Image: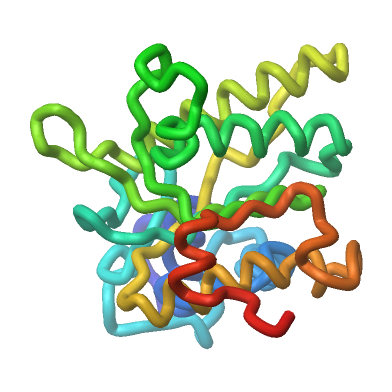
Amino acid sequence: MWRGRPRPRLRREALVCLFFSQNPQAGDVYPSQTETALSTMLRAVGGRGRPPHTMSSGASPLAKFRYRRRLPHLQKADADIFVTFCTGGPLVLSSAARDLVLEHCLREDSSNVARAPSPANCPRPRINLWAAVIMPDHVHLLPSPLRDGSGWPFPLVDILQCLKSATAHRINKFLHHSGPVWEEESFDHVLRSDESLKEKCEYIRQNPVKAGLVGRPEEYPWLWVNPEFQKRNLVGEGG
């Protein structure tokens, strides 16, 4: 039994870290499933802010930590990264809003800059983008950050902050309102092999199909797969 000074309340940040330490594959699932599981855990701690006994672990929550705002990303140089971020609250992206988001994603990609009419006038690309899908309430990206002039990888957190800030500004202007468009947190993890890269790309392709928005991936206007990657890896062959 706890004696002496009152037990300190467990901050939500620590609870989120604890959730991902116990569910290291949470970034792989559909965001709504992750959010449901996380919300269930947060409700389970009750008014005193103590975690349920079933979530106890000998390891520190931060030992397996993957992502949390105000804490560093797990980013490996020259690695492919699977990224997910969601809209804030009940916001559902319209067709025009999804156009804007996809446009900004492709601006960052090196292959699209190279194919631009005036590549010299384009900003320096910061990623190789393998695939992207803009869903009504979330975004999946599969980028590989490039290196800057000093040889250091462009920080993923900076790339995402720029993307989310620019798209939020344009979406709010288009909708004639203000306020957050995206959740502050994004989920990401480093892929381990070429095979997992192909699997994640196919997962992105099938996302609108599984959501019931289209019958085939090719029918969804806000899906993009790098043409070179698609030819080299035969992604979606026979689909």
Of the pair 18 and 202, the residue shown nearer to us: 202
Q: Residue at x 27, y 78 (%)?
A: 59
Q: Quadrant of the N terminus?
A: bottom left
Display coloring: rainbow
* Left or right of 30 in this view: 186: left
* Left or right of 107 in this view: 146: left
Q: Quadrant of the C terminus?
A: bottom right
- When asked about the image quadrant of residue 114, the answer is top left
Of the pair 114 and 162, the residue shown nearer to us: 114
Of the pair 155 and 122, the residue shown nearer to us: 122
Q: Residue at x 56, y 24 (%)?
A: 165
Residue 190 in the image: above or below residue 220: below
* Left or right of 152 in this view: 104: right
Residue farthest to the left, as pictured: 150
Residue 130 in the image: above or below residue 160: below
> How far across and how far down the image is residue 83, in percent?
50, 55
Q: Residue at x 44, y 68 (%)?
A: 18
> How far across and how far down the image is residue 160, in percent?
47, 37
